[in-house]
């Protein structure tokens, strides 16, 4: 199942720089692990903001919840999820 996931990061301004850097490093490692596993298909920065638009390819809602809630930045993000399905006019073979 494909989902569009929009994540907006809102770190507390008072968070020490070192703590923020450590969380971001763990987030990057986990995000890249999920991309290599084919679970996190697309990751795009929203220009001009600390936000991304992503496409996840997971078994079901429960797997999406598990993966997203394990993100190190999860406590500091606003997340919006939209379920996707194939568009009848799409010419791509791999977007089911
Ligand atoms: O930077 C972000 O958009 C937040 C998050 C998503 C992947 C990652 O490495 O950090």
Image (spheres, rainbow, N blue to C red):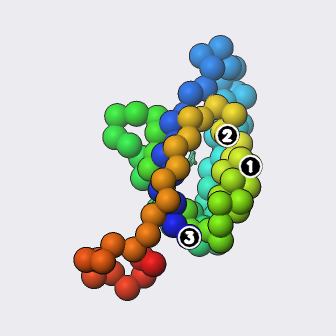
Q: Nearer the viewer, mark 3 or mark 1?
A: 3
Q: Disc 2 marks which residue?
A: 74
Disc 1 crowd, CA 10 A, few/some/many (<14, 14-19, 20+): few
**Which secondary structure lies at badge 2?**
helix
For the point 62% across and 50% down, which residue is it?
28
Q: Disc 3 marks which residue?
A: 1
Q: Is residue 34 above or below residue 74?
A: below
Q: Nearer the viewer, residue 5 or 73?
A: 5
For the point 27% across and 82% down, which residue is it?
91
- Mark 1 Cβ inside 8 Å of ligand 1: no
Work out how far the residue at label 2 is from the one at label 1, CA to CA, in angstroms.
7 Å
3 left or right of 30 in image:
left
Q: Earlier in the sequence, mark 3 or mark 2?
A: 3
Work out how far the residue at label 3 is from the one at label 2, CA to CA, in angstroms.
21 Å
For the point 64% across and 31% down, which residue is it?
76
Q: In terms of image quarters, where does ligand 1 lie?
A: top right
């Amino acid at each position: 199942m494909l989902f569009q996931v929009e994540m907006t990061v809102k770190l507390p301004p008072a968070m020490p720089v070192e703590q923020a850097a450590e969380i971001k490093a763990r987030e990057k490692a986990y995000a890249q692990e999920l991309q290599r596993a084919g679970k996190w298909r697309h990751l795009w920065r929203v220009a001009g903001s600390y936000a991304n638009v992503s496409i996840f390819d997971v078994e079901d809602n429960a797997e999406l919840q598990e993966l997203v809630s394990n993100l190190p930045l999860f406590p500091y993000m606003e997340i919006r999820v939209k379920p996707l399905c194939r568009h009848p006019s799409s010419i791509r073979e791999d977007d089911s």
